[in-house]
Amino acid sequence: MKIKKLVLSLLGATVAASGILAAPAMAAEEQFFPMLVYRTGPYAPSGIPVANGFRDYYTMLNKRDGGINGVMVTFEECETQYNTKLGVECYEKLKGKGTHGATLVNPFSTGITYQLIPKAPVDKVPILSMGYGRTAAADGSVFQWIYNFPTTYWSQASAFINYVAQQEGGHDKLRGKKIAHVYHNSAYGKEANPTLGVLAEKYGYKLTLLAVDHPGQEQKATWLQIRKLRPDWVFMSGWGVMNQVAVKEAAAVNYPMDRFVGNWWSGSDADVIPAGKASKGYKSAALHHPGTKFRVHDDILQYVYNGDTEEAKKNNFGEVLYNRAVLNAMFGSEAVRTAQAKFGKKAMTGEQVRWGLENLNLTEQRLDELGMNGFTRPVKISCSDHESGGPILIQQWDGQKWNIVSDWIPTMRDVVRPMIEKAASEYAKENNITPRNCG
């Protein structure tokens, strides 16, 4: 037996010396980002530019910088068709890939996000649901693994009411006004309703809630109600084909477009172009600027498209949702970089990236270094605050392009944060979670 062990030991040493076993040890580490996409189905007009934005930013990082501090970024798409069941299947398929498994997951669907929330602490894969998902996840004392910065649906709804108040001449002028919320009849679409309801009681406006069933192609009855109601303002939480149809139907009943404001998922190029001239004047909330005037776009054009502007445009370059994904991909890669500053310049685990997300501090200086100064606002995350409660912009379609038509509009932090903490506390009780002490 001793002789057999000796022979095997010598054989192993010989093989290793020859380099046959050395190859796996030399394999480069990789930072793997799963991409849950929907390039097909009724939400493809929204899903395609998002998928292209993620892909192009990750590709640029590799070609321009050699990855993140020398660690190459890898990614793989999985088609969800914006279907929650398929989305969970994609997550399960991709979560174990890469050097240490998934870096984080961007579900890009509120329904999928809800299903992945209980999986995150078990799998140790953080969720970055940027501006969507469960709003209560902004309370990091309960939702340790979920991040929804730079702002949430509840904060957005409060900023929309602030914008309406600005246009009407003050919050006191809201009393008696009629505001309708046209929303996708899903967990996503319903998210803004609680905040709009609380603020209706606070300011005295009359709120009407109008649900639109999936996928949103049938809306004539909804807009006939709008024509009859004649609301002073219409707010919309739509997605995919629903937005296109809504803009057309609003024009058909002669609703004034400059009083029709979509949320930040209802303000893409694909939402307005099908309606032609009729969409001129339509507005939406925004988390960042549209267009390609920022240095990050110059770098993508150079390193991904070799300066071929026409090819880039074929891939939605500079469109609103393309830019949204570029911003999202930046947040994720900067969380990795933040984690590397603590744990070393190597591939990060999901648990280490969670730390990076929770300690993310994107200053004006850092945004400038990333070529995004002016593109968006600084973000600072903490243990207790996974949202940051950032303000929003309002953009308006002029028939050819989106233009920013407001300053950064603040959210009602004093109203929204207590709602978040209450909802998070209820979730903790229902799921036997002991909130952590954030100090």
Image (tube, helix red, strand yellow):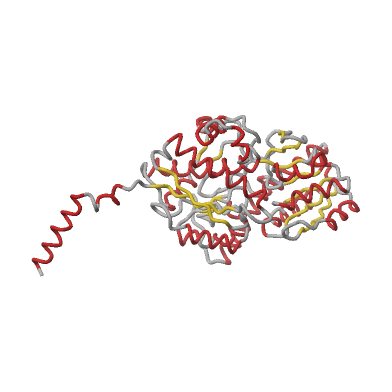
Relative to 179, residue 401 above or below: above
Residue 229 falls left or right of residue 56: right
Q: Residue at x 57, y 36 (%)?
A: 378
Residue with the most extreme bottom position: 1
Residue 393 falls left or right of residue 353: right
Q: Position of residue 83 (x, y in %)?
A: 62, 60
Q: Position of residue 46 (x, y in %)?
A: 66, 48
Q: Position of residue 130 (x, y in %)?
A: 59, 48
Q: How many marks?
A: 0
Residue 153 falls left or right of residue 116: right
Residue 25 falls left or right of residue 278: left
Question: Where the N terminus falls, by quadrant?
Answer: bottom left
Q: Nearer the viewer, residue 28 or 162?
A: 28
Q: Residue at x 60, y 52 (%)?
A: 108
Q: Position of residue 92 (x, y in %)?
A: 49, 61
Q: Residue at x 42, y 49 (%)?
A: 352
Q: Nearer the viewer, residue 336 or 423?
A: 336
Residue with the most extreme right position: 228
Q: Quadrant of residue 84?
A: bottom right
Q: Nearer the viewer, residue 275 or 344?
A: 275
